[in-house]
Image: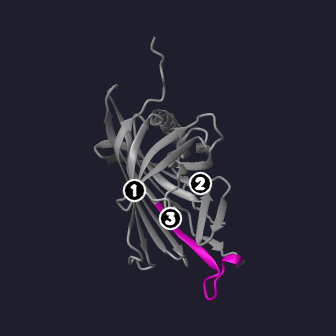
Amino acid sequence: MFVVPVLVLGTTEDDSVQKTEVLGRIGGYVQRYYAQMQSVISQETVILHSMSHDARPLFPSRQLVYELRIEWDPVAEIGQRAKAVRELLSVNGRDPRPSDTPSCTDPKAMASELLAMLLPETQNDYEFVLAGEREVDGQLAVLIEYRSIAKASAEVEWSDECITIELEGRTRGRIWAEKATGQVLRFEEALTGPFTVPVPFDQQRLGSPLRLVVERVDTSIRYKPVQFTDPAETLLLPASIDRLTIVKNAGVPRMLMLQSFSRYRRFLTEASIVQ
């Protein structure tokens, strides 16, 4: 259990109305964003830096290149409506080999999309606070701070020397959104606090720690305008994602994942019959 002190002095009905309007614009924008992304693919370059507890390199950096697309199903189960789907194109500058099994720290071939938390049907899982206005890349943006209020849960899966930990209801963050349209310009997320994972008996090794501690998972996303033709359109799409993970007692205590996106292009999703 953790206690979050909240200052309520100065909160007015106008503040509540403004927050509702801002979140409504953002929710509508995110729905349109995923609908548009169904017909867009990009190239995603991922660089993984494994580091010791004092940030010294442990292994050579690993570089992966994927073709990335977004699957969007507005009638699917909540939490499953927006998915990032990856197809591996290269590993450390060469074509993939049959022996190139995914590393523990590689991005998943299919993963949930972070912005999906801002869809209207999922906003109730979070508490949002308007934190003023800022200028981001020359645009006036509303800064919104949030934290999870849904029941916290954790899924831990062990496989050989790998462990996958999914923590829900344990996040906080900040969103910068364009004031008039609700377009998301920047997104940051972090854990509300450390999380301890006991090491199961069959994974214990002589002299090794009996628990892991997930101390930090910090994510930062930046967006950029991308121009398309036929039809002419400008969309605000991810430019980069930086994620730092720190797990005490793990084989790789620190992992820095740098993702960059390029070669955005449309593909056809409909077919027509020509007579």
273 drawn magenta = no
Kind of residue at disc 1: Asp
Kind of residue at disc 2: Ser
Q: Residue tagged by mark 3?
A: 105
Which residue is most to the left? 138
Q: Earlier along the polypeptide chain: callout 3 or callout 1?
A: 1
Q: Residue tagged by mark 2?
A: 148
209 drawn magenta = yes
In the foreground, 90 or 32:
90
Residue 193 location, quadrant: bottom right
Choose mark 3 or mark 1, whichever is in front. 1
Which range is magenta?
Answer: 202-218
Pointer 3 local density, CA inside 10 Å: few below 14, some 14–19, many at least 20: some
**In the image, is residue 107 above or below residue 213?**
above
User: Is there any visible trace of residue 242 in the rendered image?
Assistant: yes
Q: Are marks 3 and 1 in contact (CB under 8 Å)?
A: no
- C-alpha separation, residue under disc 3 versus residue under disc 1: 19 Å
Q: Residue tagged by mark 1?
A: 95
Q: Are marks 1 and 2 in contact (CB under 8 Å)?
A: no
Pointer 1 local density, CA inside 10 Å: few below 14, some 14–19, many at least 20: few
Choose mark 1 or mark 2, whichever is in front. 1
**Residue positioned 44% across, 46% down in the render:** 68
Pointer 2 local density, CA inside 10 Å: few below 14, some 14–19, many at least 20: many
Q: How many marks?
A: 3
Q: Position of residue 40 (x, y in %)?
A: 42, 37
- C-alpha separation, residue under disc 1 versus residue under disc 2: 41 Å
* Helix, strand or loop status at disc 3: loop
* Helix, strand or loop status at disc 2: strand
